[in-house]
Amino acid sequence: MPFCSFSKDFTENAFTSVENQFITKYLPEADGDAVRVYLYGLYLCASARDFDAAGTAKLLRLSEEKLAEIYAFWEDCGLVQVLSRDPLFVEYLPVSAAVGKPKPIRPEKYEQFNRALFAILQRAEKFLKPYEQQRILEFLENNPMEQEAFLLVVEYCAKKDGKKLTLGHILNAAKGLVRNQKYTYEQVEAEYSDFNAYSEILANLFPKLGLYRKPREEDGAYVAKWLNAGIEAGAIYACADSMNRGSMPSLDELVCELLERGVKTKSEAQEYLKRRGELYAIVRTAAKYLNVKLEQPRFYIETYAAKWAERGYESESIAHIAALCQSLGYTFPEMDGLIDELYASGIVREESVEEYCVRRSGDLNVLRSVQKICGVVKKTQASLDMAAAWRSWGFSDEMILEAAKRSANAQSPLPYMNRLLSDWKQAGAFTPSEIPERESAPAVQKANAYRSEAAIAADERAERERFYSARRERAMRHAERARTIAERDEAYRAAEAAIRSGEIEQAKAELYAPETLPALSARLEQARRERAEALARLRLNERDLEPQFVCEKCSDTGFLPDGRACDCYRK
């Protein structure tokens, strides 16, 4: 570090020297902004100020991109050397050593070119500075590219960039063509012919997808990939129509799905997408009841809905089954297993499915009543079959609940109930007064018997389960009572049926007939208002139809979503 330096006042009152050769040879050829940039940079070099490109551009009221373009111009003239472009770092060179003085260009040589260039740039709302115009003419002077070919490059860049068009992009595109020895109009036209073909397809696609921007290179790459794979443009349009709104990546996923299945023509695509929409409506209906978020609809369509539809199950049938599975706490795999059982039993048509679901709902109500008395009773297919068997034996709900009371202290209530009811059936006892007095009491553990830690933990767990089971049962019973009252009302039933069918129609319309969505939405909203009015007349509301659990954190299950035990136990 030197032991002495100029003071700030000294440097501010000093002078910046400008070589006369700059004034005589370069200043007349340069734009005012270019001169300002050159002189201010010269001043910074002389004063050794610590000033970056961003600060300089802001001070001179220029963009950083414009500053870089101006220094590229001076570099072409041989007055500076750009050592780094990001961040921008420039080294000034002596004017006397410069060999890149702008060439004198005859205006008449580029008269028609300049008019055509101005017309293209005017349509793109882009206007060049004089020094930028000078750089274009210098490029044409120093390279063998035809003027018409260069205009084609400008037009290509303007279509692609619109208002964001820059001189740097134009020159970079032209230099790339020159490196590949593309000089003539015909050569450049052939180079850009694919883009022009893709532009027409993109112009038709973007409104369908709800995109209102200029096409980019990556958009053309998608189109090129699709067409090279052999799919027709009409099939691509059909995919965009089915999406209604979307992005190019999401459209790419759908088009690739068609290609995987060998679907390439417009008619094949329309047929496939129609079928896909029907399957999506099935999945959406099931997911609504099962409370499943459809992050990957294609997985559910291919894994479940396609199989269900092939077996003849329609949307209404799926809705009945899904509603039953909701009550059982099932998800898609369990629902799929139930449909497998129904199919094996020949239950396919909507009438038979509805009859089965109503019957199963009755069995489920029996289990809920038993659960209220005995505590934890898992609602599985096996337990539902057991409840159905008891009813088929001719036992009334009163007798089933009597058996539940006598089995409440058993370690396994349902098997004990089954033995009791079987014995009563054999004895011909179908009313409480006919029950024989000889049956043994359920096996319970002796009070003074040794109990291991595992047994104690099991009892505590069972007690906890009974606690939460009772809570959930109260909430479920309240909701079930409200639904029963509502379903007895004819106006409510009609509105509920209209909502169910309307939601299915709306799901299909989202994929295939978006123009009908406003009318469908209006009808659906009217049906919802009618349902709300019917509930209000019955002194009910939407919340009454769903279980209202005491603890919102665990929904009275005792466990939080992350698997930890909830702290609401016995609180």
Image (cartoon, helix red, strand yellow):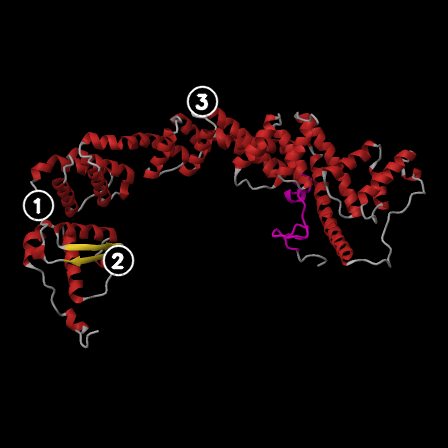
Q: Determine whether the residue tagged by mark 2 lies in a helix, strand or loop.
A: helix
In which quadrant will I find the C terminus?
Answer: bottom right
Residue 441 showing in the rendered view? yes
Q: Earlier in the sequence, mark 3 or mark 1?
A: 1
Residue 212: name its quadrant: top left
User: Closest to the observer: 503 or 471?
Assistant: 471
User: Closest to the observer: 478 or 511?
Assistant: 511
Q: Is residue 424 left or right of residue 288?
A: right
Q: Determine whether the residue tagged by mark 1 lies in a helix, strand or loop.
A: loop
Can you say whether 311 is above or below 369 in the image?
above
Q: Residue at x 13, y 43 (%)?
A: 138
Q: Residue furthest top?
A: 267
* Distance between the alpha carbons at the discs numbered 3 and 1: 61 Å
Say which amino acid is labelled 1. Lys
Residue 524 showing in the rendered view? no
Q: Residue at x 70, y 57 (%)?
A: 569
Q: Residue at x 65, y 38 (%)?
A: 334
The residue carrying mark 1 is 103
User: Closest to the observer: 58 or 392?
Assistant: 392
The residue carrying mark 2 is 54
The residue carrying mark 3 is 267
In which quadrant will I find the N terminus?
Answer: bottom left
How would you rate the neighbour count of disc 1 (Cα within 10 Å): few for under 14, some for 14-19, many for 20 or more? few
The residues colored magenta run 536-565
Q: Earlier in the sequence, mark 3 or mark 2?
A: 2
Is 554 included in the stretch rendered in magenta? yes
Can you say whether 140 is above or below 519 in the image?
below
Q: Position of residue 335 (x, y in %)?
A: 64, 36
Q: Earlier in the sequence, mark 2 or mark 1?
A: 2
